[in-house]
Amino acid sequence: MSRKIVAAGNWKMNKDPFEAISFLKEMGPLVKGKDEDVDVIFCVPFIDILPAIDSVKGTNIKIGAQNMYFEENGAYTGEVSPGMLKSAGVTHVIIGHSERREYFSESDITVNKKVKKAIEHKLTPIICCGETLEQREQGITIDFIRQQIKIAFLEVSKDDAKDTIIAYEPIWAIGTGKTATTEQAEEVCGAIRKTIEELYDTDTAQAIRILYGGSCNEKNAKELFAQEDIDGGLVGGASLKKEFAQIVEAGQ
Ligand code: 13P
């Protein structure tokens, strides 16, 4: 089965609204046409969302968020609800990034709550998983990732599951310039697909898109995306630069 490649940028806490506008206006022509073959998504800081959506009008670039809360509204100072994202025109939302797990105490349980809420609001969750270097060295990577995936998908139906996106991001490869080898990345992405097959069925496992993230750049993207179980990338640092257009091209 051929799955459409996803080139998703995660800007993290970078680019103010003015920088977002000028960058995206420049990016539009660079990915023109390519954004029909590849799903191009920029997950931007909340404050950049509206100007970003305005700046990509007339292109196929989609704008995503980097987080959301799992309640509809109410006394949750500082949080943003899925309904707010949806009404702004957001299509995708990153859930459970390792930085949120590490610095903001997110757990597999909150990840699951957010995944279900995103789906309810017809936002596509980009569900992150990934092991630490210590876990890799202990040889428990696959067990650990399987557990993250199983909890993230609790009470998610088969039909909903197949439209979600999973991002495998080994923590030791994030922002370090140390990419996982294609073999390491493919091994874990294959294990994730197998886990989805066990939870649901072969059709669901074949439909779901699994991305690699962790020092993915314009030099290594083509080889990574050519792997059987890798359907694109979740890109941090390299999504802040024009070279991101080459990552999109690598997915064609
Ligand atoms: P880098 O591409 O900067 O390593 O970040 C990866 C990441 O965390 C994307 O979500």
Image (spheres, rainbow, N blue to C red):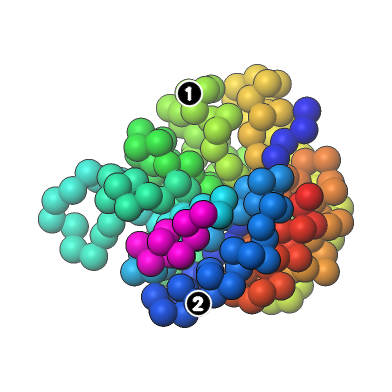
Secondary structure beneath disc 1? Answer: loop
**221 within the magenta span:** no
- Whichever of labels 1 and 2 marks the residue nearer the N terminus, that label is 2
Is the distance from the Cβ of mark 2 to the nearest ligand 1 atom less than 8 Å?
Answer: no
Residue 188 horizontal side relative to residue 93, left or right: right
Give percent across and percent down for residue 116: 39, 36
Q: Nearer the viewer, residue 175 or 143?
A: 175
**57 within the magenta span:** yes
Q: Is residue 128 visible?
A: no
Q: Quadrant of the N terminus?
A: top right
At 84% from the left and 46% from the top, the residue drawn is 227
User: Residue 22 — which label?
Assistant: 2
At 78% from the left and 50% from the top, the residue drawn is 252
Residue 151 horizontal side relative to residue 83, left or right: right
Give percent across and percent down for residue 62: 51, 52
Q: Amino acid at mark 1?
A: Ser
- The vertical placement of 148 against 222, above or below, is above
Q: Nearer the viewer, residue 88 or 133?
A: 88
- The vertical placement of 222 against 109, above or below, is below
Give percent across and percent down for residue 196: 64, 30
Disc 1 from disc 2: Cα separation? 40 Å
At 77% from the left and 33% from the top, the residue drawn is 2
At 14% from the left and 51% from the top, the residue drawn is 74
Give percent across and percent down for residue 251: 76, 52
Segment colored magenta: 50-58
